[in-house]
Amino acid sequence: MSRPDMVTPTIRAAVLTRDGFMCRAPFLDTTTDPCRDRWGDAVVIGTRAYHDALTLDHVQSSGGRMGKRAPSDPAHLVTLCWHHHLNGWATSHRPMLREYLTRTEGPDDADHD
């Protein structure tokens, strides 16, 4: 069974390239803690472990729709390390992530299905 609207390898590569193959959290929030992998170990920028810790977070452009994921396109995806994506930072910094995506991808009038 295939999942609809999956992030393709081409889109993943485009988002990682746009974001410099780096977690955006430390650049957007200079007070945040260091990047970490899925096991909670700190990772050093530029290392294989750092690259392996990178994930893509789906960000709704206008506050989101309950239970619906944002589209899998560069205007709705941002690179974050495992820790910043899945340990609460991304959820509590949605406005900051939306602003970043608007600056890098341009405004998106409405999310689409």
Image (tube, rainbow, N blue to C red):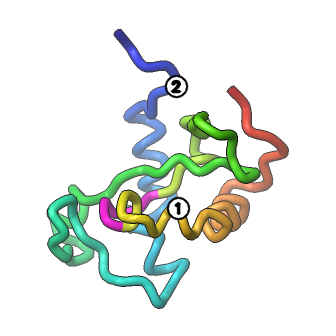
Residue plotted at (70% across, 66% down): 99
Residue plotted at (73% across, 31% down): 112
Furthest residue to the front?
Answer: 66
Label 1 packing within 10 angstroms: few (<14), some (14-19), many (20+): some
Could you tell me what secondary structure mostly forms the magenta stretch? strand
Indicate the amino acid at tag 1. Answer: Thr
Q: Which mark is residue 91?
A: 1
Residue 17 part of the magenta segment: no
Residues under labels 1 and 2: Cα distance?
A: 21 Å
Q: Residue 68, position in %: x, y?
A: 60, 34
Q: Earlier in the sequence, mark 1 or mark 2?
A: 2
Q: Which mark is residue 31?
A: none
Q: Residue 25, position in %: x, y?
A: 46, 73
Quadrant for the C terminus in the image: top right
Q: Which residue is mark 2?
A: 5
Relative to residue 51, is residue 11 depicted above or below? above
Looking at the image, residue 112 sits to the left or right of residue 33; the answer is right
Give the magenta-colored segment's residue range: 79-83
Residue plotted at (48% across, 62% down): 19
